């Protein structure tokens, strides 16, 4: 069989984090009762007129700046005509001829090395509604709450050659957009969606093969499986001497199968024309500089600063900056207690473990930096043993409880009374003469058993350092 190369480009749709829709004042909140966040504008009623939400344009420009795009100073909206039940006007307001951002790129890093993925354009548009299929009644319902939610569509160049590069590109985009605060990019809620355009060609060939577009990809796992499946499907067709048909396909992740939805449209099929109800968008130099001045520190910059300012190793810096929320908590807590490595350990260790157990994402963290800093100080000073500190942290993670209050209420404070500890240890030595004998015969591990018995007797509240000190002193006298 010939050797083939896979060529992939992505159309990434991102719902922006505005409170209201792109052309009306309806709420964009996710999860509301169907058809309650609607009005004449977003349901396409005759005579209603759209008005652009300024924040949408600012978010689009911010993403463009962060992805090294050229910002179009004079951009316009266009009307894209198509007829689906979830599209109330029978057209979508989008941008074809003069998109707001063009000619950018982001750098990705994979096992194959570093590579720049080109961004052809970023344009603004409105989202459609959502079809809800009831298989039991064999009917479909339409929810227009999502209709008019602001989107940016980020169209890449066909620069990706594997699923690994695709995921690296999507993760980089998601991180940039989350750090900007432009979207939460939750794939499971549809606020970030990717359509995969894929073709294969004989290795070394200059011409692209016939591409297909795959939709309904709502997780990185589904995207990876869909790419592998479609690549193999196209290669099998070419090997059998059959043509690849340009079409849109829908991926069924449960069945690991894609099926044809419709022939792939080109721009002329949508009969684009300039949107008559909206004026052009003029991005003045002053407005552009105002948006640029508000650009936050992105992940790559923050990761480098954490290594330099806080002395974090590469692994810690990578893990913490993998979520803007976690990075914000780390920075605030570290600035309070001045123990960045200790704070990082709590976030990378116990926090990640509890997030996994509860099925939460790092961006859903409700940890308060002040309380994390207080716990870090309590544990580092020995006021809490490691075991007790983990118990306090779990309570703080789940319920937001103040660590000092919980420590006092539960009696978890480390026992540092030397007289009390000495009495407990003397009792343990009398109860375990064999371990004492083993230690005196040179078996150093015996002291570990005696430490364990002491910690058990004090319910884990004894200071380990003080326990070791008293044990060695008393064992020397036996």
Image (cartoon, rainbow, N blue to C red):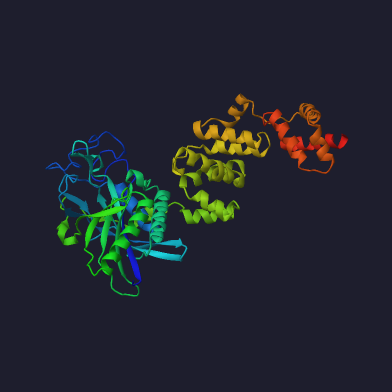
Vertical side of 62 occupied by 470: above or below: above
Is residue 317 in view?
yes
Question: Viewer-proximal residue, 100 or 158?
Answer: 158
In the shown orientation, is residue 195 left or right of residue 412?
left
Residue at the left extreme, as displayed: 46
Question: Viewer-proximal residue, 34 or 452?
Answer: 452
Question: Viewer-proximal residue, 227 or 85?
Answer: 227
Q: Quadrant of residue 211?
A: bottom left
Vertical side of 459 occupied by 120: above or below: below
Give me the residue at 17% from left, 48% from top. Answer: 84
Give me the residue at 31% from left, 37% from top. Answer: 31
In the shown orientation, is residue 406 left or right of residue 435?
left
> How many marks are shown on the rendered structure?
0
Q: Quadrant of residue 248?
A: bottom left
Q: Percent position (x, y) of residue 9?
A: 32, 62
Residue at the right extreme, as displayed: 477
Q: Quadrant of the N terminus?
A: bottom left
Q: Quadrant of residue 418?
A: top right
In the shown orientation, is residue 444 left or right of residue 60?
right
Is residue 120 in view?
no
Give me the residue at 79% from left, 29% from top. Answer: 422
Q: Quadrant of the C terminus?
A: top right
Q: Percent position (x, y) of residue 103?
A: 33, 64
Q: Percent position (x, y) of residue 160?
A: 36, 64
Q: Percent position (x, y) of residue 264?
A: 20, 59
Vertical side of 449 occupied by 419: above or below: above
């Amino acid at each position: 069989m010939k050797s083939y190369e896979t060529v992939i480009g992505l159309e990434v749709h991102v719902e922006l984090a505005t409170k209201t829709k792109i052309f009306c004042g309806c709420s964009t909140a996710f999860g509301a009762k169907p058809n309650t966040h609607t009005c004449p504008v977003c349901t396409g009623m005759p005579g209603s007129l759209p008005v652009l939400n300024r924040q949408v344009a600012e978010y689009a420009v911010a993403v463009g700046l962060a992805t090294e795009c050229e910002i179009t100073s004079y951009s316009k909206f266009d009307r894209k005509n198509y007829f689906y039940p979830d599209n109330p006007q029978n057209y979508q307001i989008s941008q074809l001829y003069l998109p707001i951002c063009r000619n950018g790129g982001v750098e990705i890093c994979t096992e194959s090395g570093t590579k720049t993925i080109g961004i052809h354009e970023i344009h603004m548009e409105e989202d459609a509604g959502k079809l809800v299929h009831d298989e039991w009644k064999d009917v479909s319902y339409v929810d227009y709450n999502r209709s008019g939610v602001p989107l940016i569509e980020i169209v890449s160049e066909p620069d990706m050659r594997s699923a690994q590069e695709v995921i690296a590109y999507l993760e980089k985009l998601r991180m940039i957009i989350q750090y900007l605060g432009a979207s939460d990019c939750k794939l499971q809620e549809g606020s970030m969606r990717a359509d995969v355009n894929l073709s294969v060609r004989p290795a070394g060939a200059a011409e692209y093969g016939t591409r297909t577009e795959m939709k309904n990809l709502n997780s990185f796992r589904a995207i990876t499986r869909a790419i592998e499946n479609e690549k193999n499907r196209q290669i099998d067709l070419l090997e059998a001497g059959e043509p690849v048909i340009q079409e849109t396909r829908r991926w069924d992740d449960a069945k690991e199968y894609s099926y044809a939805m419709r022939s792939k449209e080109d721009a002329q099929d949508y009969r684009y024309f300039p949107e008559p109800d909206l004026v052009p968008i003029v991005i003045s130099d002053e407005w552009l500089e105002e948006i640029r001045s508000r650009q936050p520190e992105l992940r790559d910059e923050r990761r480098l600063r954490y290594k330099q300012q806080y002395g974090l190793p590469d692994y810690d810096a990578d893990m913490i900056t993998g979520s803007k929320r976690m990075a914000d908590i780390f920075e605030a807590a570290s600035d309070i207690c001045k123990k960045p490595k200790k704070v990082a350990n709590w976030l990378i260790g116990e926090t990640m473990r509890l997030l996994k157990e509860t099925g939460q994402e790092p961006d859903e963290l409700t940890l308060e930096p002040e309380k994390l800093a207080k716990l870090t100080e309590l544990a580092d000073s020995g006021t809490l043993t490691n075991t007790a500190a983990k118990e306090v942290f779990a309570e703080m993670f789940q319920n937001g409880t103040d660590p000092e209050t919980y420590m006092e209420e539960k009696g978890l404070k480390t026992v540092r009374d030397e007289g009390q500890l000495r009495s407990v240890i003397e009792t343990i030595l009398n109860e375990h003469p064999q371990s004492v004998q083993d230690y005196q015969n040179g078996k150093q591990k015996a002291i570990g058993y005696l430490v364990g018995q002491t910690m058990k007797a004090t319910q884990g509240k004894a200071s380990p350092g003080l326990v070791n000190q008293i044990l060695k002193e008393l064992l020397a006298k036996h």
